[in-house]
Amino acid sequence: MIKLMPGLAAAGLVLSLMSTSAFAAPAGSAPDNARAPAQIVRVAQMPKYVKPQFKRKKVRLVTTEAAGTVIIDTNNKYLYLVEGNNRATRYGIGVGRDGFGWSGVVKIGRKAEWPAWTPPAEMRRREAAKGHMIPAFQEGGEDNPLGARAMYLYQGGRDTIFRIHGTNQPWTIGLNMSSGCIRMMNEDVTHLYDRAPVGTKVIVIGPGNRQGKVAFEDRGIDVLRTMFGG
């Protein structure tokens, strides 16, 4: 079972002016009144700088996990796609801020390109109290907090409410700013999306250690693969 840190409500994803982590509902699932014209969340034009250590890289990863597994190290802000033979692709990620971390073993249960966003009523009320007005529904697109792609994480056939998704705030990669979702640069989430099918095992290493035993060691850049491919 996934264990949430104290103070995290089941649907407690918080949208702030500088940090958006969100939900998307399947097509056609938004309430009727949510389809009415709504204000769109616009994002500030911030620098798209990401620290070099969080750029996508081919690395030497020693692990007992099978090829195709996704390992998310929330402590070090890395997501690994295991490729076998001590190989992996490593991506930089943004993770949950204090009190919104979690751990567990889940699966990708659904995927969407340029996903829509339907924030829960609890989030809208909470943010409204802070003066932040959030739309009841937002179509997918460049201004959408979920970015270019979303992979919905399920456990036991049920949606966990957490996602691996893109972001229109790439400067948040490497930071603890989300409300539990795993955010990636749009180009990176698209790269992963094309390689991680529905059913992919995802191990999230974080507070609570509910992921169980997982052995992996990042031994750094795979120089030969980086230079010559493969």
Image: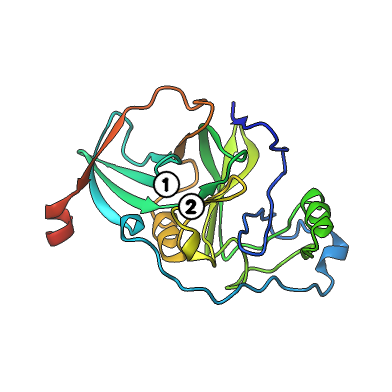
Residue 218, percent across and down? 26, 39
Where is mark 1, residue-wise?
77
**Residue type at the position of mark 1:** Lys
- The front one of 218 and 164 is 218
Judge the density around disc 1: few (<14), some (14-19), many (≥20) Cα neighbours within 10 Å: some
In this rendering, is residue 106 above or below 44? above
Quadrant in which the C terminus appears: bottom left
Judged left or right of residue 132, residue 89 is: left
Total tally of numbered discs in the picture: 2
Judged left or right of residue 164, residue 158 is: right
Where is mark 2, residue-wise?
175
Residue 212, percent across and down? 45, 23
Residue 119, percent across and down? 74, 55
**Residue type at the position of mark 2:** Leu
| Residue drawn at (44%, 62%) of the image | 190
Judge the density around disc 2: few (<14), some (14-19), many (≥20) Cα neighbours within 10 Å: some
Judged left or right of residue 103, residue 18 is: right
| Residue drawn at (62%, 54%) of the image | 21
Which type of secondary structure does the marked residue at label 1 adopt?
Answer: loop
- The front one of 31 and 19 is 19
Which type of secondary structure does the marked residue at label 2 adopt?
Answer: loop
- Marks 1/2 in contact by CB < 8 Å: the verdict is yes
Residue 203, percent across and down? 45, 35
For this orientation, the residue located farthest to the right is 33
Q: Do we see residue 120 in this rendering? A: yes
Image quarter of residue 205? top left
C-alpha distance separating marks 1 and 2: 8 Å
